[in-house]
Amino acid sequence: MSQTAEGIKKVGILTTLIRNGNLNKNTILFIDEPETNLHPLAVFELVKMLFELSNAGVQIFLATHSYFVVKQFELLARRHDESVQLTSLIRQEKAISLASDSLLNGMPENLLIDASIRQYEESVRLDIQG
């Protein structure tokens, strides 16, 4: 496994935990940036797997910096009419606060969206100049 990408390792570990029955209704799963080194289409499948695990009663705490991961959870929440909580850490000067929203209500304002918008605006500016 040493030559295997981190994202594939995480999928393999999740698959093993599911197959051997260690992920069940009363399990809490902590997972950090599961999208790392995964193909974008594999990221969507992984998010779908995590969403289904959550529906089966597994409580999932996921850390990510990926707009695509959060957006995919939002789409699944809206499609299935189920709440998926998003909690963001917000730094304001020397203080850090929390903002929590349900993705069922759509994508809340957050730094991931702000960065995506800045990138899009730069692309539009270059296209206009070009």
Image (cartoon, helix red, strand yellow):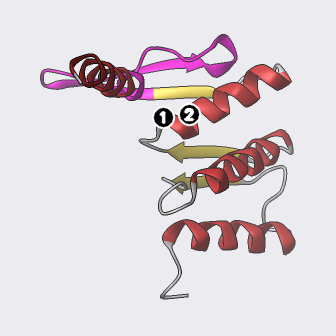
Name the residue at 55% across, 61% down.
38
Q: Residue furthest bottom?
A: 2
In the rendered view, does 99 fall on the left or right side of 42? left
Q: Is 15 on the left-hand or right-hand side of 44?
A: right
Towards the viewer: 124 or 62: 124
Give the image location of residue 87, x and y in percent: 49, 27
Query: Mark 2 near mark 1, Cβ–Cβ under 8 Å?
Result: yes
Q: Secondary structure at mark 1?
A: helix
Residue 50 picture location, percent across and down: 72, 48
Residue visible at 13% across and 21% down in the picture: 93
Q: Name the residue carrying label 1.
A: 67
Q: Is residue 104 magenta?
A: yes
Camera-side residue: 26 or 86? Answer: 86
Q: Secondary structure at mark 2?
A: helix
Tell whether position 91 is magenta.
Answer: yes
Horizontal and vertical percent position of residue 51: 75, 41
**In the image, what residue type sits under mark 2?**
Val
Residue 99 against residue 57 in the figure, above or below: above
Q: Which residue is mark 2?
A: 70
- The residue most toward the front is 130
The quarter holding residue 125 reads top left
Which class describes the residues within 10 Å of circle 2: few (<14), some (14-19), or many (20+)? some
Locate the C terminus and report the quarter of the image it occupies.
Answer: top left
Q: What is the quadrant of the N terminus in the image?
A: bottom right
Residue 118 in the image: state x and y as whole percent: 29, 22
Identify the magenta region. Answer: 88-113
Task: Give the residue drawn at x 67%, y 72%.
Answer: 13
Asked if residue 59 is positioned above or below residue 6 in the image, the reply reads: above
**Would you call the spot at circle 1 few (<14 residues within 10 Å), some (14-19), or many (20 or more)?**
some
